[in-house]
Image (spheres, rainbow, N blue to C red):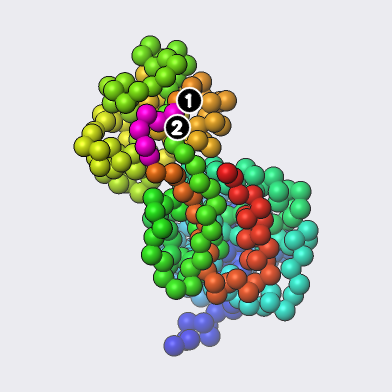
Amino acid sequence: MHSALRRLDLNLLLAFDALYRHRSVTSAAAELAISASAFSHALGRLREALNDELFIRQGNRMHPTHRAELLMEPVASALKTLAEGLGQWEPFVPAFSQRTFTFAATDYTAFALLPALMQRLQMEAPGIRVRLVQSERKVSIEDLASGRIDFALGYSEGRDQLPGGVEVLDWLTDRYLVIARRGHPRVRGTLDLVGYLAERHVVVTPWNESSGAIDHVLEGMGLQREVAVQLPTVMAAPFIVGSTDLLMTVPGHAARTLQQVAGVELYPAPFEIPPYALRLYSHAKYARSDAHAWMLEQLRSLRVR
């Protein structure tokens, strides 16, 4: 069962993990407090043990092979579990900790959380690192249970049924607003339902859904809007709205921020939409960790209303 492990110095997995994250021998060696020469020697031993190049130099960066990509998740998960297990006997001191917390989020949910969180960490725990992985589903339950991630930020239209052990915090509840570019020729002062449906729209569907949450609401009313562009991420959407006559319906927190940077005006949605709910998910089996409990408390205190 453990024949492969018996042939491998487990310290080499630390080198693998560091190089995968940094893509630089110099940076990875610095993290492990060893020389670049010693790190290269460790990488050579790891390559020999696993019979794969693992990382190939392209320019100034080390790029993982297919085998390394397959190994990354189990290695990161195993190191995280070991670190947390060993860390139970060490006091967690935020001001001096260099722990990494991993979040699963979409670009919008990260936008809602990370600016305030990183500002807090910079002041109170400057050595703590945050790693963001792209959320591939509304709630990354399996990744939470396995320990591959510490927290998941999930958008939900209602209270979903959750498996045992998963804990949820209603982190952000928000109403939807409509954004349109300043000087839009047909949207001035107010926006009614007829005018809303007469315009074309930008929609973001992060999990490649066929339609967005607003379209489901309209469908329930027996109505339909015309979607001009459908995107998997939020990044380009407000700038498209700011330079065209297209409309976009987004949570108010985002709308108010975008008003400052993308040249848009805000309008109340001209029909009833259930509130946008951004929830923070974690797993009970990690709650005993002082580090996990501390971070959860930071997140609670940062809740946006």
Front residue of this view, candidates 123 and 1: 123
* Residue depicted at 32% across the width and 46% down the height: 208
Q: In which quarter of the image is the C terminus?
A: top right
* Residue depicted at 49% across the width and 72% down the height: 165
Residue 76 in which image quadrant: bottom right
Q: Horizontally, is 178 left or right of 225 in the view? A: right
Residue 271 in which image quadrant: top left
Q: Which mark is residue 246?
A: none
Amino acid carrying label 1: it is Leu
Segment tinted magenta in the rendering: 268-273
Please report whichever mark, 1 or 2, sits nearer to the chain's N-terminal start.
2
* Residue depicted at 63% across the width and 77% down the height: 85
Q: Quadrant of the N terminus?
A: bottom left
Magenta run includes residue 193: no
Residue 299's place in the image compared with 147, above or below, is above
Crowd around label 1: few <14 · some 14–19 · many ≥20 (10 Å): many
Circles 1 and 2 in contact, beta carbons < 8 Å: yes
Residue 208's place in the image compared with 125, above or below, is above
**Residue for badge 1:** 266
Q: Horizontally, is 123 left or right of 267 in the view? A: right
Q: Horizontally, is 259 left or right of 27 in the view? A: left
Distance from the alpha carbon under mark 1 to that under mark 2? 6 Å
Residue 84's place in the image compared with 191, above or below, is below
**Residue for badge 2:** 177
For this orientation, the residue located farthest to the left is 222
Amino acid carrying label 2: it is Leu
* Residue depicted at 78% across the width and 61% down the height: 96
Front residue of this view, candidates 135 and 113: 113
Front residue of this view, candidates 70 and 206: 206
Q: Where is residue 266 in the image (x, y as percent from the top left)?
A: 48, 25
Q: Dot 1 lies on which element? A: strand
